[in-house]
Image (cartoon, rainbow, N blue to C red):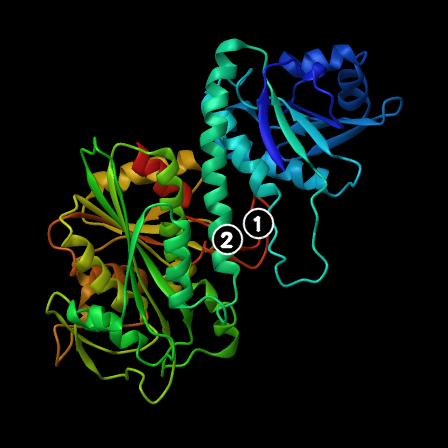
Amino acid sequence: MKVKIEKKSILDVNADVIVVNLFEGVNTPGGVTGIVDKAFNGIISDFVIQKEKFNGKYGEIYQLPLIESGKKIFVTGLGKQSDFTYTKIRDLTAKVVRSCSLSKNIKKVVSILHGAGIAGLCPFSCAKMIAQGAISGTYVFDKYKTEKQENPIEEFIIAEINDEKFEKAKKGLEEGLIIAESVNNARDLINESSQYLYPETLADYAVKNSGVKTTVYNKEQIQEMGMRAFLAVGQGSVHEPKLIHMEYKSENAKKKIAIVGKGITFDAGGLDLKPPSSMLTMRDDMSGAAAVICTMQAISKLKPDIEVHAIVAACENMPSGSAYKPGDVITAKTGRTIEIDNTDAEGRVTLADALAYAEELGVDEIIDIATLTGACVVALGTVASGIMGNNDNKIKEFIEIAQKAGERYWQMPMYEEYGDSLKSDIADTKNTGGRYGGTSAAGIFLSKFVSKADWLHLDIAGTAFLDKPNSEGIKNATGIGIRSLIEYIIQ
């Protein structure tokens, strides 16, 4: 489906569906909705609002067929104006596209620039969100189905006649499409079966598709770097671990940042084997890796004035005769020793070495993103991701930027007491502790492997893979984290 903007009145675009909107409680349509209403003899105000009692509640869509022309008007509810956000523009657009795709007769859709009228929001950001919603609304993963789900929509057009709004919206649309493509690419990676996506194939994807200089290190090279914690996790698998390092450098870079993604391409739990029901979707344990790889795809096209390094320590956590064992003591890249209390707390062990590697690059900031703890799912469910770090101002800044990008993060505490459960009698630390406060204990563990740089940790265990559709209509892999990382980096 092609998404574009045209400098025309919405009535001058020849389309099968005209998408307009109403805020909750509005009885007399204004703006472009009002223009469409008048053009069709008050059909929205007299029929949809007065007779059908459509009140503009957020998310509701009234499909109004125009009998003579065979076209339809979609009247979309925006909810209360005081509660309206950019995220709602994205989610509403995705819902409209999904509704249109159910009809084989709808090939061309034209829409208002939602939010840029009466709501007074930025045209650039409104178009950016519409682009993301339109592309997200078409997403399906049907690679292994014999009957493919074809999307009949050929074009989704934003109509905007105002010169100033048009120019801003055009740029926003371009940026939004880049971000949307990266998110959908990440969803494809995460949804892919682990029989086909393992460390080597993930590394190959990064080399071919990240859009930036990419170096892949093999087992022997990783050994020479002293990354014994990372290697320990992967030693039970027949697939060799790979360290992936992607680099983007602007000539005008004034800042140097590293993003680190957890890259467990399948997590069986190791010798502390997961129960079958918990193992079923563990192909998603590389969601952090997918996020940083696909963030680099977008960065390579957006070209911000910054230097970005993306790091993935990719491996499988499998049980076998060569697997690392509970009670083992392994030495991380920093020289810190780790007693393995549970082999299923493997992500933090790989991240320990990946964080140390990132800091050796001399970066100002490090952000790691990982499906790290079940405790985070218990605490925050599937609505928000957890965030921790060593700089409260950076945490607050990231949360605010992420909110505008349409993602939610909630700061979890890192009190010293949470580290008590990690104390070991035979090593510097254990890799996991007691049953309670698991997310914070994991954050404390990771913090010991960053000594100088500002560091943020994003725990996306509850938000990366869903068993039912979210507000965008996305089930399974969500591509969480990419929008926030991109916005944080380019700002």
| Residue 373 vertical placement versus 160 (above, below) | below
Q: Which residue is mark 1?
A: 474
- What residue appears at the point 48 percent right and 29 percent down from the top-left corner? 174
How far across and down, in percent of the image, does residue 214 sit?
30, 53
- What residue appears at the point 12 percent right and 69 percent down from the top-left corner? 336
Q: Nearer the viewer, mark 1 or mark 2?
A: 2
Between 203 and 364, the residue placed more toward the observer is 203
Residue 437 shows up from this direction: no
Determine whether, in the image, residue 402 is placed left or right of residue 470. left
Determine whether, in the image, residue 6 is placed left or right of residue 491. right
Figure quadrant of the C terminus? top left
Residue 187, which numbered label?
2
| Comes first in the chain, label 1 or label 2 | 2
Q: Amino acid at mark 1?
A: Ile
Q: Secondary structure at mark 1?
A: loop
Determine whether, in the image, residue 451 is placed left or right of residue 44. left
How far across and down, in percent of the image, does residue 481 sit?
40, 47
- What residue appears at the point 52 percent right and 55 percent down from the top-left corner? 188
Residue 94 shows up from this direction: yes
State the separation of the CA atoms marked 1 and 2: 10 Å
Q: Residues within 10 Å of mark 2 (few under 14, many from 20)?
A: many
Q: Amino acid at mark 2?
A: Arg
In the current view of this chain or complex, which residue is farthest to the right?
A: 68
How far across and down, in percent of the image, does residue 231 sit?
25, 73
Dividing the picture into quarters, in which one does residue 110 lie? top right
Q: Are the residues flagged by discs 1 and 2 in contact, CB closer than 8 Å?
A: yes
Dividing the picture into quarters, in which one does residue 312 lie? bottom left
